[in-house]
């Protein structure tokens, strides 16, 4: 539907409302509660429109008089305001002249004060120079003193640190001396102990030697007791010697180690003592230098303080002079400021006077323009539009009408399908229960009672099926269709609904259809006697035909005889296959026709990449700035005027996108070709080119006249220069000369059609956003996306038809096949007994199916192609034309799917052949 934006009144600028007009929304009480798509609503609104049109001239005249009175009052008020403004301007001119004289007098006074200030400034500058020199000398002395002080401080720190380090080292040396003395005493004591141990060792060695001094002869002369005592003495002497030797060696080792450590420590101590003595000498030398520097520093400090006192005295005298100068300078500056302020005020008053004078002159011009506009004011006019002029309403109404046309077309088609389903189902039951019916007849039942049984079955099944169909339509079909269409409108998903009256009529018609189909199916039962029914059904006897005499095979003659003997079944089979194939052809034709529009429209007609919109009134340079950016990006473009315009080709007002520009240049971006002849549009043609769909809906053709409204809704009769091919949208195109001729003004360019040529769109848009007057840039593919929504609708329709075709083929063909197999059971059993294989028997059965399927497919393609074309014309809208050329691929796919359905169902129905027994021939 339409999209509206609501804003506050202050968002409007009256001067920018060019081409706008007042609008009143009229609601009729007589249409409350009515559907806007009903004929009754159309009658009511047409009547109201006629009444409004009847008073349009009267109300237009009153409105014209009202506007003229309003503008005349505004002109009179404007003249009065201009006279008052002229009087104020004259008073302001007198005040300006007096102000100029006062300013000139004050300027002379300020010049004398400036001379005195300049003299005082020179004296101050000389004093300042002397002070600066003295300050520089003092600063240099202060820097030297600071450096000397820093150096003395650093020396003091170093001397303090050195003194502390000397004290620390002295303590360490004293500690080391004490430790050395203690170690010397320990070494002396150890040496004495070692000497004593040596004496003990020597005594033990001597005792051992004396013990071992006995000769072997002397030892041999000893008694056992003496020998034992001797050995004990020797062992004790040996043990004492070894212990003494071990103690001596251990003591000797410890003494050597202690002696080595003592010698090393003594050497280290002597080295440290030498370093300490050298450091003490350096410290005493540094201390002497520090004391000399300190005396020199205090002498320089005294000289500095004397110079600083002299400087401060001169500085105080200078500061007093500066203060006096600044006071006088401030007075001068204040005077200058007052003078400048007076000049600014005078300048402002002059500008205000000039602006006022300019405004006065503009007011005079504006008043003259208003007087001229009032004298040239055209009479007001009314335009009364009903709901049919609303684009959203018309789109929704046409969509609903398309669905309605589809529903009527397919309803008639499905009536035939329903009749076939009922007929084949009841016919199969009747054939299977033939003997049972004969028995019932023999027992005295009337035909009406027998027919009633099948009517009950048929009607009950019909009612159940109808209810299932209503529910399926509500929950499935409506959901699919409404969901698809809801994507195309702002209103969102439309809730499905059940029309009680329509549903009741549909159920009633279904019941009538069931009664007729059941009656036809049972006609043979009603006409046959009980005896005939209880016998096996005999095939019809046929006279020998020319085919049998011409050498046609028995196999072929049997098939032909079977087809002639049950012509009704052959016709039903053919019609069923044709219906199945026709449904598929319709579905694929719809899908192919709609989906091909995108390739036609956006592959052959619309060539440009992007459409750039701008407002030329926003800036004088907007076109130059945009073209410079496009040139820099390497884009190719053409400039045109494009905008929505109302037009009237019949009784209703409709809308179109009117494109105006250099048609020769536009042809590189819009490949419009003439309708039927498929030639390039002539660039210099007189009038406007309309698209083929507009010609079909309005009857207007080349040479005719249509009414196109300009931005103020003023009507303009324009000649139709020709008709061009276009599939989507509502377009008209004309050259600039024709636009100026029929609309009385040059077109205002507001659009560029362009090729990006590989340019980065995002960077391009970033630059364009900086241009005042640039509005938007949209790709041609945007419209292609909207077309895909429509394509999705018909894709779902095609799938729905595929499912319905499959179900139809299943129910009808399966019933017919099983019924045929039951009829031929005896014949098929005899064939099996006589040596025919299962494959040969099935081929015998399927040959007839193949013949009827081929005929049905060919017939279905023809019917489906015709109905598909009719359906396409039904669903086309004023702004949408679908591809009407034959869709050969869809026909071929439909034929293959139908053949596959038929083959699968026939194979399923003839499974019984392989299970035939000899008893089946009885």
Image (cartoon, grey):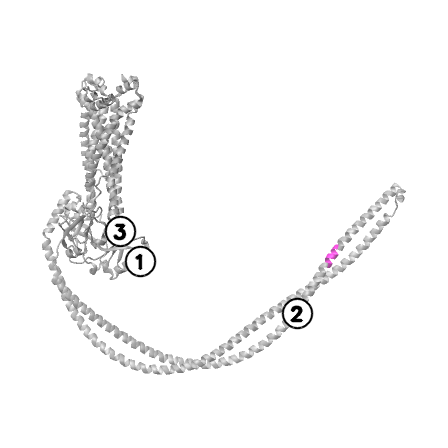
Image location of residue 39, percent across then percent down: 14, 42
Q: Secondary structure at mark 1?
A: helix
User: What label does residue 278 carry, if any?
Assistant: 2
State whether the magenta stretch is mostly helix, strand or loop.
Answer: helix
Closer to the eye: label 1 or 2: 1
Q: Secondary structure at mark 2?
A: helix
Taking the spot 10% from the left edge, 57% from the top edge, the residue there is 61
Image location of residue 38, percent across then percent down: 16, 42
User: What label does residue 632 carry, if any?
Assistant: 1
User: What label does residue 455 carry, if any?
Assistant: none
Residue 612 quadrant: bottom left
Could you say which is closer to the camera, residue 291 or residue 587? Answer: 587
Residue stretch rendered in magenta on the structure: 253-259
The answer to which of marks 1 and 2 sits earlier in the sequence is 2
Answer above or below: position of 706 versus 321.
above
Check the image and name the residue furthest to the front: 550
Work out how far the residue at label 1 is from the one at label 2, CA to CA, in angstroms: 86 Å
Whether 255 is among the magenta residues is: yes
Closer to the eye: label 2 or 3: 3
**Residue count near mark 2 (Cα–Cα under 10 Å), binned few <14, some 14–19, many ≥20:** few
Reading the image, the residue beneath label 3 is 608
Could you say which is closer to the camera, residue 300 or residue 767? Answer: 767
């Amino acid at each position: 539907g339409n999209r509206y934006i609501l804003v506050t009144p202050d968002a409007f600028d009256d001067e920018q409302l060019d081409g706008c007009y007042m609008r009143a929304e009229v609601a009729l009480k007589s249409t409350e509660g009515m559907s806007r798509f009903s004929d009754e609503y159309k009658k009511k609104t047409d009547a109201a429109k006629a009444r409004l049109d009847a008073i349009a001239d009267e109300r237009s005249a009153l409105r014209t008089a009202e506007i003229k009175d309003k503008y005349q009052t505004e002109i009179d008020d404007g003249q009065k305001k201009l006279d008052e403004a002229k009087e104020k301007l004259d008073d302001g001119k007198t005040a300006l002249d007096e102000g100029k004289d006062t300013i000139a007098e004050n300027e002379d006074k300020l010049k004398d004060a400036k001379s005195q200030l300049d003299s005082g400034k020179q004296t101050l500058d000389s004093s300042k120079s002397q002070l600066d020199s003295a300050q520089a000398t003092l600063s240099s002395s202060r820097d030297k003193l600071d450096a000397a002080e820093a150096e003395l401080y650093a020396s003091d720190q170093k001397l303090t640190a050195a003194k502390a380090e000397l004290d620390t080292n002295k303590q360490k040396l004293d500690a080391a001396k004490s430790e050395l003395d203690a170690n010397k005493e320990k070494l002396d004591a150890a040496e004495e102990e070692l000497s004593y141990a040596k004496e003990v060792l020597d005594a033990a060695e001597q005792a051992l030697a004396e013990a071992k001094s006995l000769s072997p002869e002397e030892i041999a002369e000893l008694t056992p007791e003496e020998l034992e005592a001797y050995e004990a003495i020797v062992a004790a002497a040996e043990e004492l010697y070894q212990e003494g030797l071990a103690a001596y060696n251990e003591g000797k080792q410890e003494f050597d180690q202690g002696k080595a450590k003592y010698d090393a420590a003594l050497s280290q101590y002597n080295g440290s003592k030498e370093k300490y003595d050298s450091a003490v000498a350096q410290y005493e030398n540094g201390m002497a230098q520090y004391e000399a520097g300190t005396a020199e520093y205090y002498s320089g400090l005294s000289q500095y303080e004397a110079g600083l006192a002299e400087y401060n005295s001169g500085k105080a005298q200078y500061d007093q002079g500066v203060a006096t100068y600044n006071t006088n300078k401030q007075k001068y500056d204040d005077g200058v400021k007052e003078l400048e302020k007076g000049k600014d005020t005078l300048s402002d008053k002059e500008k205000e006077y000039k602006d006022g004078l300019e405004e006065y002159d503009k007011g005079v011009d504006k008043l003259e323009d208003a007087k001229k506009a009032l004298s040239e004011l055209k009479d007001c006019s009314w335009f009364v539009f009903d709901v049919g002029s609303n684009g959203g309403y018309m789109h929704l109404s046409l969509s609903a009408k398309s669905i309605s046309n589809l529903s009527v077309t397919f309803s008639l088609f499905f009536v035939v399908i329903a009749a076939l389903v009922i007929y084949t189902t009841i016919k199969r039951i009747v054939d299977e229960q033939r003997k049972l019916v004969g028995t019932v007849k023999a027992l005295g039942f009337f035909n009406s009672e027998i027919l009633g049984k099948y009517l009950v079955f048929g009607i009950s099944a019909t009612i159940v099926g109808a209810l299932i169909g209503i529910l399926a339509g509500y929950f499935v079909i409506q959901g699919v269709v409404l969901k698809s269409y809801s994507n195309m409108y702002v209103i969102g998903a439309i809730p499905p609904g059940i029309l009680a009256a329509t549903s009741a009529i549909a159920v009633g018609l279904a019941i009538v259809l069931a009664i007729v189909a059941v009656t036809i199916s049972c006609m043979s039962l009603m006409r046959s006697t009980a005896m005939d029914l209880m016998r096996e059904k005999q095939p019809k006897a046929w006279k020998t035909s020319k085919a049998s005499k011409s050498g046609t095979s028995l196999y072929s003659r049997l098939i032909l005889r079977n087809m002639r003997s049950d012509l009704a079944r052959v016709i039903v089979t053919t019609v069923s296959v044709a219906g199945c194939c026709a449904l598929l052809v319709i579905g694929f034709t719809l899908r192919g026709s709609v989906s091909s529009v995108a390739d036609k429209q956006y592959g052959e007609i619309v060539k440009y990449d992007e459409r750039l919109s701008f407002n030329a009134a926003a800036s004088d340079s907007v076109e130059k700035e945009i073209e410079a950016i496009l040139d820099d990006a390497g884009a190719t473009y053409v400039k045109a005027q494009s905008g929505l315009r109302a037009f009237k080709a019949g009784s209703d007002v409709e809308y179109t996108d009117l494109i105006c520009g250099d048609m020769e240049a536009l042809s590189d971006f819009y490949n419009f070709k003439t309708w039927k002849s498929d030639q390039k549009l002539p660039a210099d043609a007189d009038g406007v080119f309309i698209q083929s769909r507009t010609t079909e809906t309005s009857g207007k053709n080349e040479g005719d006249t249509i009414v196109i409204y300009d931005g103020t809704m003023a009507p303009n009769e324009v000649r139709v220069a020709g008709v061009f091919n276009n599939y989507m949208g509502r377009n008209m195109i004309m050259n600039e000369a024709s636009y100026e001729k029929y609309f009385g003004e040059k077109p205002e360019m507001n659009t560029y059609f362009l090729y990006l040529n590989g340019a980065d769109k995002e960077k391009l848009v970033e630059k364009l956003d900086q241009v005042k007057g640039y509005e938007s840039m949209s790709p041609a593919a945007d419209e292609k996306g909207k077309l895909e929504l429509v394509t999705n609708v018909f894709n779902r329709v095609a799938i729905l038809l595929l499912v319905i075709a499959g179900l139809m083929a299943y129910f009808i063909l399966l019933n017919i096949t099983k019924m045929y197999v039951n009829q031929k059971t005896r014949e098929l059993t005899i064939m099996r007994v006589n040596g025919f294989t299962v494959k040969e028997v099935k081929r015998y059965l399927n040959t007839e199916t193949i013949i009827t399927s081929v005929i049905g497919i060919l017939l279905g393609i023809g019917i489906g192609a015709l109905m598909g074309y009719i359906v396409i014309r039904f669903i086309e809208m004023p702004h949408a034309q679908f591809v009407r050329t034959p869709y050969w691929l869809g026909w071929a796919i439909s034929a293959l799917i139908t053949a596959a359905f038929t083959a699968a169902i026939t194979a399923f129905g003839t499974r019984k052949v392989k299970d035939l027994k000899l008893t089946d021939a009885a």
